[in-house]
Structures are given as structure tokens and as C-alpha cells.
Image (tube, grey):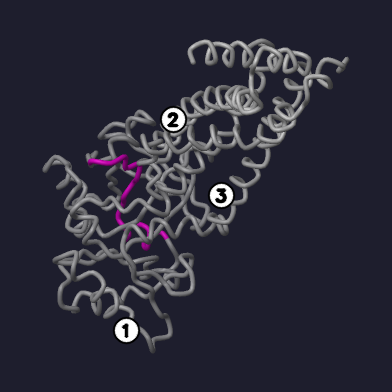
Amino acid sequence: MAKFITLVWKNATRNRRRSLLTIASIAASFCLLGVLMAIYVTLFLTTDESPAGSRRLVTRNRISLTQVMPISYEGKIRQIPGIESVMAYQWFGGVYKEPKNFFARFACEPDQLFKVYPDYRIAEEEKKAFLKDRAGTVLGRDLANKFNIKVGDKITLKGDIFPVDLEFNVRGLFDVDKNEEVMWFNIDYLWKSLPAERRDFAGAYLTIVQSPDDGPAVAQQVDSLFRNAQVQTKTESESAFAASFVSFLGNVKLYLFAISAAITFTILLVCGNTIAMSVRERVREVGILKTLGFTNGEVMSMILGEATVISLLGGFLGCVVAWTLCKGIATSAGGFANLEGMTLAPWMWVAVIASAMVMGTVAAIIPALGASRTSIIDAMRYSG
């Protein structure tokens, strides 16, 4: 048995250049497959929320996130039983120094911010300074570190969605358990900077309920409250709202499945072609092996073993690269769609490597079957 394994290994690595290129091709394909798997799990299967996050609901315009709602809705929402606090907020957009410096920038009600986000940790004096300064802003510490921003600095956002340039005083930095690259500032500062007819609106309302169990009922009551209004609403959990941003990219699930199918087909072609070339080079050797007593099944198993070894190495290397890429994406995601939690979990390593081995073996079946059925006479006559 040990000699058989040694023979498989030597045959798999006899043409090192071709083997390395094949392993690299498989690694690249399964690296992409691993990253796609991690993205899918993070976007559609991960429901990990903080205790406070599980109590937060987001109410937005039923038509689109880009459509605003009257500020008068806040008082009506606040009267619904089971609600602890409500905050109106608005995506500002804008540009900080350069367009590539993207991060979340929200106008909010400062006196409600730390009620709906009790998981934000900030020094009390910084919190008071933010509440007193209409032009004040607080930032996630991750964001501040990324752009080397300190308390007391002044930063400017050049408007794009809104035709105003706003200058802010950095009054505080908050900490939170997850990566939170976000900036909050006073929505009244935004309103006062706009023409009168464009004031008193909210892009969304963030609500925190008394218990996670109250969420579905409260969401239904909020939407029922405005069912016959001119501007109807849609209320959902914070995690569902974050995932809805992905819908802007189209049918992401379909894209991921289509790319995965293309990868699978490519791997079959690569592995099948490599093994076929290897078998054609060793037809006479197959005849010699049969002369020495190797059965058809042993010849076939040996060739399938070569494909499995090459696929195993490619799959493992692909996982290493995919794991590195996932860490990079998680670090730079800035909280978008919960991608900061993206990782290649241990079970994904197993799934990717197992898939690589299966694909390699399946691709090698036809060449291996053909070699095993070659008679000794035909093999010895072969001159290719």
C-alpha cells in the first residue's frame, strides 16, 4: 500500500511545471469559490446580533430608501406600546477630502442617538459636548483611526445628495464591539443649511423596542399606522435593513450561484485536460504495469489518486488565499451589510477542499477508465 501511494505521488509530480500550473489554476478557482461562499453566508445566513441590535427596528419609505418621510411620523411612532425610543435620521453622503474616502455619514437627533444605540461607549464629557454643539459630530473609533481624526479636529463634508458643504467639530469618539466606521451629526444642522421647503424630513426612523420579542408586532403596528397615508412605510429589523443594501447590486444570490457554476465547469475542464495529457504520455507505462500484475482497478485507482492529490493541494492553497482575502474584505468593509464579520470558517475549509477533491476525481474518471481498459498489446504498440 505504501509503495502504491509513493507511485501515485511520483506520477502526480513527475512533470512539475504542469503540476504546479494545474495546482495554481485549481487554487485560483477554489479561492474565488471560497470567497463567494463566505460572502453568501455573511449576507444571507448570518444572524449574529448584539443584544441591543436585536431590539432595533428601522422604518423607511415603502417605495425606496431614497424617498424621505415627514418628520411628523416620529411622534406617532413614539406612541406605539413597546417602544423605548425613536430617532429620525438621514443619510447625508457627501465627500470627505476625496471620493475614495467612503464611510457612513448620518444626520441624527443627538439626544436620541445613545438611547437607540446603548451599545455605543463614549466618555460622558464627549457626549455632553456633542449634545451642546449643533455643528458637533461623533465618530466610531475605527473610522477616526483610519483617517487619523482626533477629538477637537474640524472636518468638512462636501455635499452631493444635498447642495451644502458642512463643517463639523469632532466632539467625541465612541467604541462598539463590532467595526463601526460611521459618523453621526445633528440633523437640525442639516435642516438649517437647506431651503425652508426642504426641511423637516427623515430618511428613516430607528426604533428600539423593550424586548426582541416585541419587534415583529411593533413593526406591524408601525406600518399599519401609515397604511392609508400618502407616504407609506416599511419596518424591518436592523439586520434585515442592512442586508437590503445588497439588493441595490441586483440579484446577488443568482450572481453567486452563476459564478460558482462557471468555476465548477472550469475546474472540470482543467483537471480533465491535465489528467488526459498525463495518461497519454504514459500509455506504454500502463502496459508495463499490467504486465507486472497491476489490475485494471489498480491502474484506474492510481490515476484517480493522482487527480485527487493535485486537487487536494490546489484546494488547500485556494483556501489559504481565500482566508486572507476574507480578512482583508472584513477589515475594509466599514460595516457595510455586516461584511465586517466575513470569514472563512473551518467548515468552509472542509467544504472547499472536499469539493476540490471531488471535482478532481470526477474530472479524471474518463481518462482513468480509458487507461484501465487499454490492453497490454495496444499499450506496448502505442508510440504517441
Tell me the number on the disc at residue 271.
none
Q: Do the residues under discs 3 and 1 have CB atoms within 8 angstroms?
A: no
Labels 3 and 2: the sequence-earlier one: 3
Tell me the number on the disc at residue 224.
1
- Front residue of this view, candidates 34 and 296: 296
User: Dividing the image into 4 quarters, which one contains the C terminus?
Assistant: top right
The reply, left or right, for residue 300 in relation to residue 79 is right
Q: Identify the image quadrant of residue 228.
A: bottom left
- Front residue of this view, candidates 322 and 281: 281
Q: Nearer the viewer, mark 2 or mark 1?
A: 2
Q: Point out residue 316 in the picture as x, y percentages from the top left corner.
A: 49, 25
The residue under label 2 is: 323
Labels 2 and 1: the sequence-earlier one: 1
Disc 3 to disc 2, how far (Cα)? 18 Å
Q: Do the residues under discs 3 and 2 have CB atoms within 8 angstroms?
A: no
Labels 3 and 1: the sequence-earlier one: 1
The residue under label 3 is: 256
Circle 2 Cα neighbour tier, 10 Å, few/some/many (<14 / 14–19 / ≥20): many
Q: Who's the residue at 44% across and 74% down the image? A: 62
Residue type, mark 3 in image? Leu
Query: What stretch of residues is rendered in magenta?
Result: 177-193
Q: Do the residues under discs 2 and 1 have CB atoms within 8 angstroms?
A: no
Residue type, mark 1 in image? Ser
